[in-house]
Image (cartoon, rainbow, N blue to C red):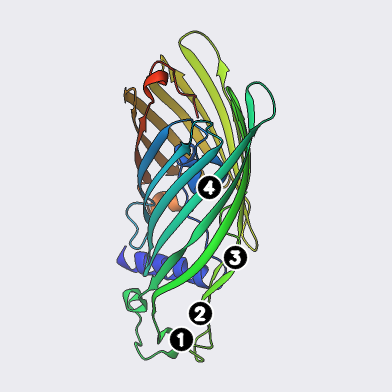
Amino acid sequence: MKNRNIIFAFLALFSYLAIAQQDAQFTQYMYNTVTINPAFAGSRGLFNGTIFHRSQWVGLEGAPVTQSVSFNTPLGESNRVGLGISALNDEIGPSTEQVFFIDFSYNIDISDNTKLAFGLKAGGNLLTVDFSKLGIRDPQDPGFGANIDNRFAPNFGVGVYIYGDNGYVGLSAPTILETEHFDTDENPSSNSLAVERATIYFMGGYVFELSDSFKFKPAILTKYTAEAPIQVDLSTNFLYNEKLTFGLGYRPGGTASGLAGFQVSKGILIGYAYDFQLNGLQDATSGSHEVFLRFEVFKKEKAAVSPVFF
């Protein structure tokens, strides 16, 4: 098992360095939308924050472990301007990355109950790669002779988001600049290259009121990065009595998910997701676990208003 873990860590790093870095993924991304679309900031009409922890492919040494914290709120009485702040820590194999962004949005009314929001995201990331964690047989191998130590790369992103009482559609690119974190100019004998490429996200969802007690929301998230396969997240969620959420998710290519959440109080929602593999990894891992906490602060005059189901 140890040898398999070492091989996995090396292959994960190789794909990371030689092809492209992908943004960290969350199964319950719908509760952390501001991290991938800045136009979402302030769209819920109140201050809200989320805290996420995800352990992916549990049982494999060097598998991704990710934490995320984000806040967003409308500004002013008109609620036309939104502000968001997000931070993320992502560890995979010998690499660690911290990501920090500030989000701004501006929305306009396009009908009585539908708004169009434009967003801008600015920030950057710090990348560290410690090749000694790979257990390399020859430490003098020039291809692994220089680590990456807190390499900073600035970036920015944009997004649009159309939303109403029962549905939403969004298109965004949270990181636009292509950044080479580690190149052969610094270490001529190395063939390693870590590249940050733009990822384009398309999202959509709609809430159907099945009865006074049940709401049903199908949703889709599509991610495209150059030189990487298109990834699609499909999910279905039910909301019962404005308290309990439960549903299923599926990523074509090998992952199914179970999702659940509970509205502890008016302003606090807790949730959990479990991913299990439907491909060759199912024999090597016990699955992926994800937990989150969302908290919201209601204005006094809006304390009796139920939040939308997204």
- Examine the rendered structure and indicate whether residue 8 appears above or below residue 136: above
Asked if the residues shown at circle 3 and circle 1 are in contact, with their CB atoms under 8 angstroms apart, the answer is no
Residue 85 — which label? Answer: none
The answer for how far apart the CA atoms under marks 2 and 1 are is 7 Å
Task: Give the SS element for disc 3.
Answer: loop
Decide: is 152 above or below 188: above
- Mark 4 and mark 3 lie on one chain; the one further toward the N terminus is 4
Q: Earlier in the sequence, mark 3 or mark 1?
A: 1
In this figure, which residue is indicated by the disc labeled 3? 177
Disc 2 to disc 4, C-alpha distance: 35 Å
Front residue of this view, candidates 238 and 100:
100
**Do residues under tags 2 and 1 come within 8 Å of each other at their CB atoms?**
yes
> Going by the picture, which residue comes out furthest to the top?
212
Q: Classify residue 227 as left or right of residue 187.
A: right
Badge 1 marks a residue whose secondary structure is: helix
Residue at mark 2:
192
Q: Which residue is mark 4?
A: 104
Q: Is residue 214 left or right of residue 63?
A: right
Q: Residue at x 64, y 63 (%)?
A: 227
Report, in whole angstroms, how far the alpha carbon at label 4 lies from the one at label 1.
41 Å
Q: Earlier in the sequence, mark 2 or mark 3?
A: 3
| Residue drawn 45% across the image and 41% down it | 32
Q: Which residue is mark 1?
A: 143
Asked whether residue 64 is in view, the answer is no
Q: Quadrant of residue 160?
A: top right
- Label 2 Cα crowd, 10 Å radius (few <14 / some 14-19 / many 20+): many
At which x and y percent is residue 267?
34, 27
x and y, in percent, of residue 169 in the image: 63, 35
Closer mark to the observer between disc 2 and disc 3:
3
